[in-house]
DNA sequence: AGTGAGCGC
């Protein structure tokens, strides 16, 4: 059944063990090029049907086996496979295996996956260190979270839609642009086309404070982020907080003033 | 161009 994993996979772990806090160099890579597959990427051999590759060994099961050692990772581009994920964290020497979830029919990546580390502590360290930092060979940043959880539910949030974004605007830039003005900003997300890896030119900013959200919709309209003025407006809420009666259409709280 | 979306395909 389970044979020894390829030596190469474990080799990196061995090499990286020891004291390695040199995780990454966190730079603002706003100026990076649009995400492109690395040179080695071969589109012809893209989806390998039926092959679920897992790298690294699960041989060493340290200490308490019930603790969560896996992280969920999202915003993956089609060319980001298990090897890419392993390599992304191999410097830590703490990654054990990675799995990209693929569509069974097409074999294409679903855009997310799971990475297992040697321990809960290791996984937590990686989560803290890497989340939100630039991914190798990509303009995107790591989107990590604990496996087994649903999306982070940080309570009720108030969201503003932001359009007309310049192509280089990242989550970080958008977040900071609003944070500079509004203290309750929880984060921002620029919508990325998963197939191209490029920004769709719009995104969302989440506020903890509703009054700030309301203000931001008008105050930030026309303000610059990167090279272009933004356009702000109410965000259509696709995840209703409560069940609503079917067929019953609730009031529009905000008049649609976007043009 | 224009209202994301992500837990084991």
Image (tube, coloured by chain):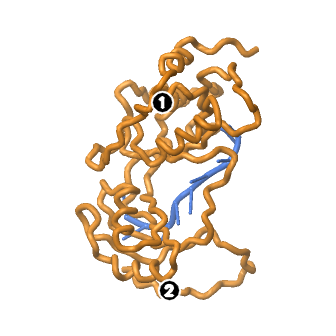
Chain colours: A orange, B blue
The disc numbered 1 marks a residue on which chain?
A
Relative to A249, A111 lies left or right: left
Q: Residue at x 73, y 28 (%)?
A: A63
> Does A219 appear above or below A27?
below
Extreme-left residue of the structure = A227
Residue A222 position within the rendered picture, expressed as x and y whole percent measured from the top left: 28, 76
Q: Which residue is mark 2?
A: A254
Q: Is residue A161 visible?
A: yes
Say which mark, if any, is on residue A84: 1
The disc numbered 2 marks a residue on which chain?
A
Both on one chain, marks 1 and 2? yes
Residues A122 and A10: in front is A122
Residue A164 position within the rendered picture, expressed as x and y whole percent measured from the top left: 33, 67
Residue A204 position within the rendered picture, expressed as x and y whole percent measured from the top left: 45, 66
Q: Is residue A102 visible?
A: no
Q: Residue at x 62, y 29 (%)?
A: A118
Residues A148 and A15: in front is A15
Quarter of the picture containing the C terminus of chain A is: bottom left
């Amino acid at each position: 059944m389970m044979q020894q994993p390829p030596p190469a996979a474990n080799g990196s772990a061995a090499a990286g063990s020891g004291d390695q806090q040199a995780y990454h160099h966190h730079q603002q890579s706003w100026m990076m090029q649009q995400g492109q597959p690395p040179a080695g990427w071969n589109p012809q051999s893209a989806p390998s049907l039926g092959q679920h590759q897992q790298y690294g060994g699960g041989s060493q099961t340290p200490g308490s086996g019930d603790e969560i050692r896996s992280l969920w990772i999202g915003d993956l581009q089609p060319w980001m496979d298990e090897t890419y994920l392993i390599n992304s964290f191999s410097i830590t020497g703490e990654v054990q295996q990675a799995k990209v979830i693929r569509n069974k029919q097409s074999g294409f990546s679903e855009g997310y996956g799971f990475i297992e580390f040697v321990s809960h502590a290791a996984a937590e360290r990686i989560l803290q260190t890497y989340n939100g930092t630039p991914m190798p060979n990509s303009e995107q940043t790591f989107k990590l979270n604990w496996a087994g959880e649903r999306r982070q539910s940080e309570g009720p949030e108030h969201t503003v839609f932001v359009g007309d974004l310049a192509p280089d605007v990242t989550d970080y830039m958008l977040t900071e642009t609003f944070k500079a003005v509004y203290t309750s900003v929880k984060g921002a997300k620029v919508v990325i086309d998963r197939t191209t890896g490029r920004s769709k030119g719009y995104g969302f900013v989440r506020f903890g404070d509703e009054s700030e959200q309301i203000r931001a919709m008008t105050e930030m309209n026309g303000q610059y982020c990167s090279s272009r003025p933004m356009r702000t407006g109410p965000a259509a809420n696709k995840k209703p907080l409560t069940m609503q009666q079917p067929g019953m259409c609730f009031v529009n709280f905000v008049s649609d003033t976007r043009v």
